[in-house]
Amino acid sequence: MNTQQDYHIHTNYNDHSDPDLTIENVLTQAKRKNLKSIAITEHVRKSSEWVYDYVEEIEHQRKYSDIKVVIGFEAKILLDGTIDCLENLARDFFIIASFHSIFANKKLWLNALKIAIDNKNVDVLGHLAPEKSFQLYDHEIEELGDLISKNNKIVELNAKYHRPPKKWVNILLKKNVRFHLGSDAHSLGEIGRFDCIMDLIQIIDKYNNNKLI
Ligand SMILES: [Zn+2]
Ligand SMILES: [Zn+2]
């Protein structure tokens, strides 16, 4: 996998990242880490009022960088499968859809996930994994894999949460699902750091090498 990419980086536009995680510093750190392309993906809600300042600041800062900088948001998947992001934003920007609350109900969780996969405005499924209280059968993961491929979504290898589970990666690969890397950085030091998910990266590299032979 190309490890000079990081498609899941937060900023200090939220209230729980490091204060020095400014957009300017993100770009400087990405350059220092020799990254070639990144996506800045702040947590968004329908009620977020900062979104246009954020977009404007990234548009401005990226003019001074030779890194490819994608403007994005991480949106929460809600119980009904919709995402907590205004339609026009979701349509115009790069969207990671992630679970951020516990449903404690496999059926509801699967239903919401399938609706999110079907959402044309969603680009990526972030830190995908079942909740602690349930597991998925292989055939259920295969079914999700078919749906993800059919809808052309990307599954993220997330460094912060070490997800998806290895078994999922193996099954989804066989369903031709595409993957990319996301550090989920909430501090400058975490940008572009993937050493903790080398096991997941190796599964994908090995699978693709075997396909080439
Ligand atoms: Zn998240
Ligand atoms: Zn995140």
Image (spheres, rainbow, N blue to C red):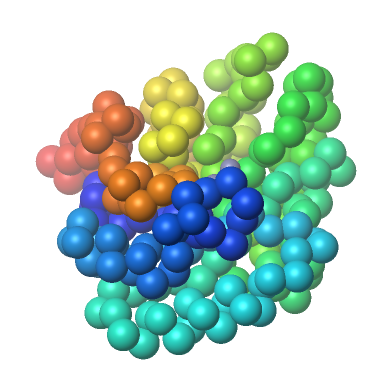
Quadrant of res 166: top left
Give the camera-side residue of 182 and 210. Answer: 182
Up-down: is 124 above or below 98?
below
3 shown above or below 85: above
| Residue drawn at x 63%, y 51% as measured from the top left | 15
Answer above or below: position of 185 versus 90: above
Residue at x 21% of width, y 57% of height:
33
The furthest residue to the front: 19
Is 30 situated left or right of 144 in this image? left
Residue 100 position within the rendered picture, expressed as x and y whole percent measured from the top left: 68, 37
Q: How many marks?
A: 0
Q: Position of residue 106 (x, y in %)?
A: 76, 21
Residue 91 in view here: no
Q: Of residues 155 and 40, which is closer to you in this image?
A: 40
Residue 132: image location, x then y, percent: 63, 15
- The furthest residue to the left: 213
Between 127 and 136, the one nearer to me in the picture:
127
Which residue is at 78% across, 39% downward? 112
Above or below, 159 against 191 in this view is above
**Quarter of the image that includes the C terminus:** top left
Query: Which residue does the image show at 44% across and 58% down from the upper left?
Result: 21
- The residue nearer to you, when weighing 103 against 64, is 64
Q: Quadrant of residue 122?
A: bottom right
Q: Is residue 192 left or right of residue 24?
A: left
Q: Is residue 164 visible?
A: yes
